Image (tube, helix red, strand yellow):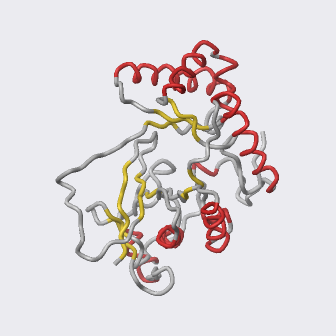
Amino acid sequence: MKRIIFLASLFLFAHTFALAQTRKDGDKPDLNRGRTLYTVGYVHLDTQWNWDYTKTIDVFLKRTLERNFDLFEKYPDYIFTFTGARRYRMMKEYYPDLYAKMLGYVRQGRWIAGGSCVEESEVNVSSSESMIREVLYGNAYYEREFGYRSIDYMRVHLSQVGGITPARKLQMFCEQYGVRICWHGPGDMSPLAHAANIHIDLAAQNLGLQEWSGIEPPNFVIQKLKDNHGALLEVFPGMPEYGNDGFVYANDKPGLGVDLNEKEAAKYPCENTVTTWTQTRNRDGSLQTP
């Protein structure tokens, strides 16, 4: 049986990330001895989501700077990372003194400017050139302001990149340039997508991390849990499972190893609702404009 070793990271929304390896059955680590947990502080901030630019500038950016400065002073080994060239530009424009102080922590290696893009952009409506320019301009800003380019991980949502074949091609392309992969794995992904993530991980030489949000649908960040917490495993037998021992397990069945139990699925009829996450779009998928 294939297993994936878990590495925990501390993020604004708590996710678990996995470092993939294959081990022999029965070769389990003793997690009660010799444990070392490495964590990195991180804030995922959408420049505009359920708030506007004004609140981002007046509240969130200022709070991100000041609260992390306090943590730097309180904890000598504290390390923090923050993404988005656009948000760094806002910091520099609206809080130049705080920005200058932040640069000091960047030089110390304690504040890490991560992410290669200007923004966490909308990949469904963007052209290929637009996506490339996001990375090009984002890294140009990082190199100009911080003296380095940020290319740590390729983090893509499998269904939005086109499925397994394009994802595999992208993974191999990244491998040629020494870029590690970290597939997006939020709680609102389908069981098949989670299984596909894990299978590509196990075939990849350049796996870095794997985001794993568990088996409880839907994602608590998006909408409230109201059904059986184990519903996914009942409806989709064969889904990769976290074994509460530091591993997530993928089975050895053909294909992705995930089946559909129609009898169990009938217990959870579809509801014609719109979650908070998708309220920027109309029901037909078109953008909702003011």
| Residue located 40% across and 63% down the image | 215
Q: Quadrant of residue 25?
A: bottom left
Is residue 194 rendered to the left or right of residue 128? Answer: left
Task: Please state the horizontal and vertical placement of residue 266, each as a whole percent of the image.
Answer: 46, 78
| Residue located 27% across and 46% down the image | 36
- Residue 224 versus residue 106: which sits nearer the camera? 106
Looking at the picture, does residue 193 appear above or below residue 259? above
Task: Please state the horizontal and vertical placement of residue 129, each as a whole percent of the image.
Answer: 82, 53
Looking at the picture, does residue 223 appear above or below residue 146? below
- Residue 89 versus residue 235: which sits nearer the camera? 89
Task: Please state the horizontal and vertical placement of residue 13, each as a whole percent of the image.
Answer: 45, 43
Q: Quadrant of residue 46?
A: top right
| Residue located 60% across and 16% down the image | 100
Q: Quadrant of the C terminus?
A: top right
Q: Quadrant of the N terminus?
A: bottom left
Task: Please state the horizontal and vertical placement of residue 288, each as a whole percent of the image.
Answer: 75, 47
- Residue 250 versus residue 151: which sits nearer the camera? 151
Q: Quadrant of residue 232?
A: bottom left
